[in-house]
Amino acid sequence: MLRQDLTSGKRENVQVTLNSDLIVVGGGMTGTCAAITAARAGIRVVLVQDRPVLGGNGSSEVRLWILGATSHMGNNNRWAREGGVIDEILVENLYRNKEGNAVIFDTILLDKVIQEPNIILLLNTTVTDLQKNGNNQIQSLHAYCSQNSTEYLLSAPLFSDTSGDGVLGFRAGASFRMGAESKSEFGEGFTPTEEYGELLGHTIYFYSKDAGKPVKYVAPSYALKDINKIPRFRNIKTGDMGCNFWWFEYGGRLNTIYDTEKIKWELWSVVYGVWDFIKNSGTLPQTENLTLEWVGVIPGKRESRRFEGLYMLKQQDIVEQTQFYDAVAFGGWAIDLHPADGVFSELPGCNQYHSKGVYQIPYRCFISKDIDNLFIGGRLISASHVAFGSTRVMATAAHGGQAIGMAAVLCIRNGYKPKELASEEKIKLLQQALSIAGQSIPGIPADNSKNWASLARIGVSSELVLDTIPFDGPWLKLDIAAGQLLPLSKNIEYAIEISANASEDTILEVDLRCSSKEQNYTPDILLEKQFVPLERGINSKTIRFKNSLKSDQYGFFIFNRNPEVEIKCSEKLVTGIVSVFNRTNPAVNNHGKQIPPDSSGFESFEFWCPERRPRGQNIGMKINPGIALFNKENLINGYVRPYIRPNAWVANWNDKNPVLTLEWEESKTIEKIILYFDTDYDHPMESTQMGHPEDVMPFCIQNYKITDRNGNLLHAITGNYQTIQYIRLQKPVVTSKIIISMEPSSENVLPSIFEIGIY
């Protein structure tokens, strides 16, 4: 029994002091990825989260699906899913939770964090105060956990604010902005007008379920009474829920920090008023058996403070794909602005325009220009309001979080301040560490000079020369234009042979196109157009192109729309090739072609996007000359995904027992082996609500073993599904040869590996 008599004065809560190398404030996707990255690299981290779960807007409290550069497969950013820890999390979620249960996703995030011994996780803990060491350095934080009535004193040499609202940077006095810059400041064509508004609002979602019997609904007193106040209410459809109602947005005319509770009540009014309309208006009788299963209790925030770093990203950097010496992450979501009046606006719920490819994000955007030991991540990064319309999405933000985590590690190891790491010489250390971790910074391959694999004599059981995509799949009717995206070489005249079935005599138009920038996948350059006569019935046609590409890059063989024609497809899947379609995706402002307003700062171009499996088969064809770009040299070229080239070793069609060997003239001491597999970087892997047909990507090698020269087993895996396999041997092995033996995952998928690291 515990009993305390009256105490003179006041009692004190339990107080705990924690010292670490890095304190991360905010446990959304950005903070979680920053903490995991730093902890795995060997420094001590305290992760402070003011909610009971991790994930922020991606958690079960808000239930927004995680997206980034892939944009629901609705833009031209091929193989663009963010790499590293965020990729690992999304792949893990797909394996455990392909149905998209937000509660299960919570457990996956928590599981990832608690498995890291270098992380101390403080849930339900809010930062309340801080101490500074002079004007430009944070010394320590005060935090309070409401669940255990414990006060924490947290100290570290480095801090990261990924709190969404910037609670740490704000209290530390760092420079920040809210709202839109004037057009004169950066010359951004997409600068919003005063009528449109300067801030993005909050959103609250709801889920419903079928109870199997009629369910009545009586709305609370605070529910919206007049559905006509929502101009888009006629867009509501039976079965819509969760992220389908992203446009339930409010608060852009208010202070999105201090007015959050007021905004929340207005959004509750909207949600319960809409449900009242759904259940009781009589216009949706098929909802009789539906009941509310869940309504969010906190709003998902889009925008509040943005902090000023050493560089501020702007619209032109995104559209023009500016190359930065200190690039550490990438983005690719459209610049996506919303009217400040949100759900009550007569305007469309969003205003999105895309760039022609992914863009780099520099390290300087992630460090405060004022506070020497403060990183800024997630929604806080140094970007204009317009550029923020793209960088704000969770996968992009998490990608930046990984850069912060790794930067903190290098600062601790080398005694750098975050600003010092931004020098042109030192930044290469960060880029290299991130590249090895699978970050895939566009245009910056890993430096393999310390990778034993780069010094090995590499042997392979086979190499693919892609001269045929087998004609073993369904017929594809050309109701819309379709194309085959292939890695092509400059100055080569290609010929392809296709099988076409025509319902009548007709002409099929076939284009050879490429992108104006070699790293992009927007076919905005027409190299040649062929007019192919077809007779009624099945035709085998060879199409010879006289024009060629001016640089090594991906090219498009495009079969223009002709409803009288079907072309034969293939069931075979090959790493680094994909079919694309001039299809629409209105959810991301893809109407087949982007036609932006005059003077908006965006370009016009067509969208050519893949279909999700089980659709979207490759187009059957013979290719002459065959494409010999899937060779063993790709295993050590520093790239871990397609970029200008497929960058993968791929076995040929007849290799049933693929084997790689790495051999050295002198024995090497090997402690770690890293294998980079293909988990289909085109797949967005939306984390919640939107289910997926697969739990393992078909390209991924699932079963393999590694032996030394004498046949001793070093490592074996059955059932791999992850992108990167980090193999730390139980004890160092001295050998002059290792053998990697693999099993094909399917007769329709060729085995492949992007990269091998041996250290």
Image (cartoon, grey):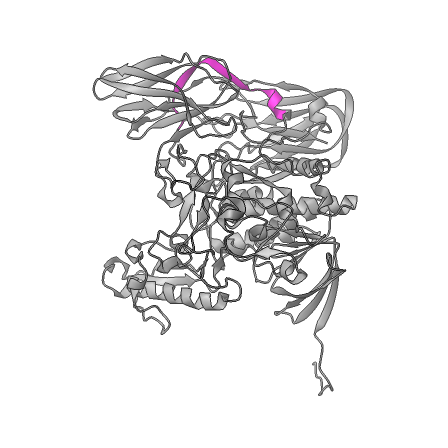
Q: Residue at x 56, y 44 (%)?
A: 313
Query: Does 42 sit above or below residue 345?
Result: above
Residue 47 x/y as whole percent:
65, 56
Residue 107 or residue 422, whichever sits in front: 422
Q: Position of residue 475 (x, y in %)?
A: 31, 25
Can residue 228 be seen here? The reply is: yes
The mark total stands at 0
- Report the front residue among 670 and 705: 670
User: Residue at horizontal 65%, vertical 72%?
Assistant: 149
Q: Is residue 634 found inside the magenta-colored segment of the image?
A: yes
Furthest toward the front, the residue is: 184
Left or right: 327 as drawn, with respect to 688: right
Does 144 appear above or below 676? below
Spot the residue most to the left. Answer: 504
Q: Position of residue 93 (x, y in %)?
A: 52, 46
Is 363 colored magenta in this rendering? no
* Picture residue at 27% right of the left edge, 17% below the top: 538
Q: Which residues are magenta?
A: 617-635
Classify the position of the C terminus by image quarter. Answer: top right
The picture places residue 217, in percent across and down from the top left corner, at: 31, 68
Q: Quadrant of the N terminus?
A: bottom right
**The one of 505 and 465 positioned closer to us in this rendering:** 505
Q: Is residue 237 visible?
A: no
Q: Which residue sits at x=59%, y=46%? A: 312
Residue 14 versus residue 696: which sits nearer the camera?
A: 14
- To which quarter of the image does residue 174 belong? bottom right
Locate residue 514 relative to residue 14 in the image: left or right: left
